[in-house]
Amino acid sequence: MDMDWKGKTVLLGVSGGIAAYKAVEIASRMRKAGAEVHVILTRAAQEFVTELTFREISGNPVNTGMWEKVTHWNVEHIALARMADLVLVAPATANLIAKLAVGMADDMLTTTILATHAPIFLAPAMNSNMFRNPVTQKNIKDLQDRGMEIIPPSSGHLACGADGVGRLPEPVEILSRVEGYFCKAGALQGKKILVTAGGTIAPIDPVRFIGNRSSGKMGYAVAEAAAKRGADAVLVSGVSALPDPVGVRTIRVETTEEMLRAVLEEFPDSDAVIKAAAVADYRVKQVAGQKIKKSEGDWSIELVRNPDILHTLGQQKTHQVLVGFAAETQNLMEYAKRKLEKKNLDFIVANDVTAPGAGFQGETNIARMIFRDGKVEEYPLMQKTELAAAILDHVERLLGAGME
């Protein structure tokens, strides 16, 4: 979590599920980032986590009931409801969701939520059958229709011993969604940002393919950073082991042709496209329907050109800001400038993938940004998340210039 939360007041509600232990880390991360954190524990939550723990973590008194001794003359649930910039409930049990859906106010948490005008985020966590139950699904939909944000549960091994959907996402994932709300006042609010990432493959037969070393980390960082700035972020991802970025609509593809179709579907109403994918430039002319058996001697494969996605976008663009990448092993500036001009880009991010710290698989990158007016900016060794932020700074600037 890299956002500065100073000046933000967050009300953290914790209801009674085994995942309540994760709420301790959520509170800790928010406070370390500078937020003022106030916690409400339901009676059931206190069976899993203690008031003392959250008091020490948050640095504030913890609210556990409606009938506690009065320490000041503010009506407590109204005071909390008014001071909150955002309400986060994690975990949100099926019981709590049901009570909120019908407007019940029978404890401190439900009463405060009913009284607040702050945005409300719910992170459901429960048994898979409970989550899939039509009643729970209807309750969730009703709350969404009323404007509450639902952070979907993840899948995996559950405390009940079953495997399936219903796990509370990790704290960092939950807080990334909350960051996205706080960032919506940024320059990318209302903008659709289309990002491509990862490598595409060229199948040879049902078990073999031609590919490259792209991990997708750079493009994924850009997409997630765009979502955090309030954008409608869409990621078209080639082959990558990375999970879908939080807050990003992700479309998975494998081949260059599949990526082209997906990108062209999203392109017309996009405001900017950052094409970080490492696509396969060639494909096998005749893909075998069955696994090719090994034989004596050499084996030749005939390749044909794949469509050039970036060139296609450059020819079709109307209002879009178009950003490309040039991952080279030699003649970096020459090749990057040629690509910038030929493909009608607004700017290009060029990097020498043979340089230490700038390869496909790592967490860092070294880059130069080259613009249409000839300006060049150099970025030394930095985290890919930092470079993603720099790229989006320039996208924001160009989008702003286009609105003047």
Image (cartoon, rainbow, N blue to C red):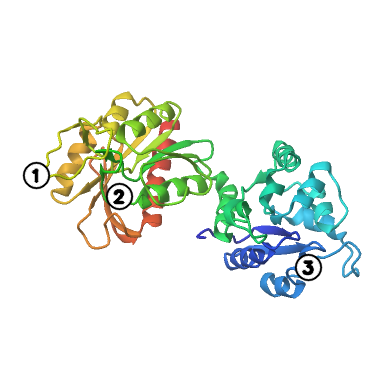
Q: Residues within 10 Å of mark 3 (few under 14, many from 20)?
A: some
Does residue 323 lie above or below 107 as drawn?
A: above
Relative placement, left or right, of 343 versus 169 is left
* Residue type (three-letter) at the residue carrying disc 1: Asp
In the rendered image, residue 315, in percent from the top left (x then y), is placed at 29, 25
Relative placement, left or right, of 347 versus 398 is left
Instruction: Identify the mark nearer the N-term, 1 or 2.
Output: 2
Residue at mark 1? 298
Query: Which residue is at 89% across, 68% downward?
Result: 68
Residue at mark 2? 214
Please tell me which residue lies in front, 353 or 271: 353
* Residue type (three-letter) at the residue carrying disc 2: Ser
Instruction: Identify the mark nearer the N-term, 3 or 2.
Output: 3
Camera-nearest label, 3 or 1: 1
Between marks 3 and 2, how big is the CA–CA gap?
Answer: 47 Å
* Residue type (three-letter) at the residue carrying disc 3: Gln
Residue at mark 3? 46
Does residue 117 lie above or below 80 as drawn?
A: above
In the rendered image, residue 259, in percent from the top left (x then y), is placed at 35, 34
Q: Residues within 10 Å of mark 2 (few under 14, many from 20)?
A: many
